Image (cartoon, rainbow, N blue to C red):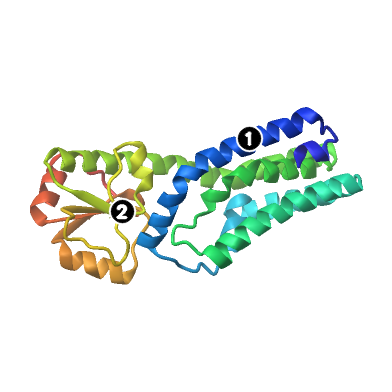
Amino acid sequence: AASIALRRVRPAHFSTWLVAAVVAIGITFPLIDDIRANTEARGNRYLADFPLELAREFIGWSWPAVAVIGLAVVTGIVTLSMRSKQHLMAVAVSGAILVGAVAIMWQVVQPYDLYVRFFVSAMPLVAALAGFGVARLPRPAQVVVVIAMVWALLPGALEVLDSQPRTREAAALVNIVRAEGLEVCGSNAEPLFVYTSPFPQVSDNGDLASCDVYVSVLGLGAEQRARLATRFEDHITLRGGIIIWADSGEIDRLERSGKVPAN
């Protein structure tokens, strides 16, 4: 879409796109069965507010960022579309692909694990549109808008940077538990796998009998929390809401290890 918009479509572009498509399919094909198995294990859920969450995270999440960057994106769409029919078609096709993919996942597939990050590949297009919008403004206004963007995005960026130590700290505790020969399981714990080897993910109704320690990263529902409170004697709540459930003796050992940060 960017190449079409810039009027730089050449035969080399099509061959590159073809190779990229073949490589993408080749990478995805072995994962299809894993996706099916994960969906069966985790189940389905309907996220009524997913499009709103997606739109907000694409343009800054906080409402000040949404207001500033969203206006720039809309201005960029209008500016680019007015250049020519070719530009209008590029914007329309790009938007249709993104909206169609979101609609199919949200309304048809409805996987339990549906997160905004799955659509991160569209971010360069959103950023380009915001750039077109800012470029349309007079130079003094450009400076003001860019400063406003940085001001609006900075709190969210700092929060993201602060979240990384949380996952490292939780992964360190998981490694301590594993060194003792205990079995670890959890839910939504994929962020920890950057710092420790993967462990089984248990769905809301999954069997906890084989778990000596349970790690929850992205929060728990009331029913799941009640199940864990029945299965395990105690828990530790780390910064960022990461919770580690185990028996009282194991929780005491983790706290004495010096690896448990203050909330």
- Residue 119's x, y, as percent? 58, 49
Question: Which residue is at 23% across, 68% downward?
Answer: 227
* Between discs 1 and 2, the one toward the N terminus: 1
In this rendering, which labeled residue sits more in front, label 1 or label 2?
1
SS of the residue at dot 1?
A: helix
Q: Identify residue for label 2.
A: 201
Say if 237 sits above or below 122 in the image: below
**Residue 164 visible, this orientation:** yes
Q: Is residue 243 visible?
A: no
Above-or-below relation of 100 to 16: below
Q: What is the quadrant of residue 223 in the picture?
A: bottom left
Give the crowd class for mark 2: few <14, some 14-19, many >=20 residues within 10 Å. Answer: many
Residue 193 x/y as whole percent: 34, 41
Which disc, if any, is residue 89? none
Spatial CA span between label 1 and label 2:
32 Å
SS category of the residue bearing label 2: loop
The answer to whether 157 is drawn above or below residue 210 in the figure is: above
Residue position marked by numbered label 1 in the rendering: 20
> What residue is drawn where x is 79% and y is 53%?
92
- Residue at (79% x, 41% y) in the render: 132
Of residues 122 and 159, which is closer to you in this image? 122
The amino acid sitting under disc 2 is Gln
Of residue 57 and residue 148, the one placed in the foreground of this image is 57
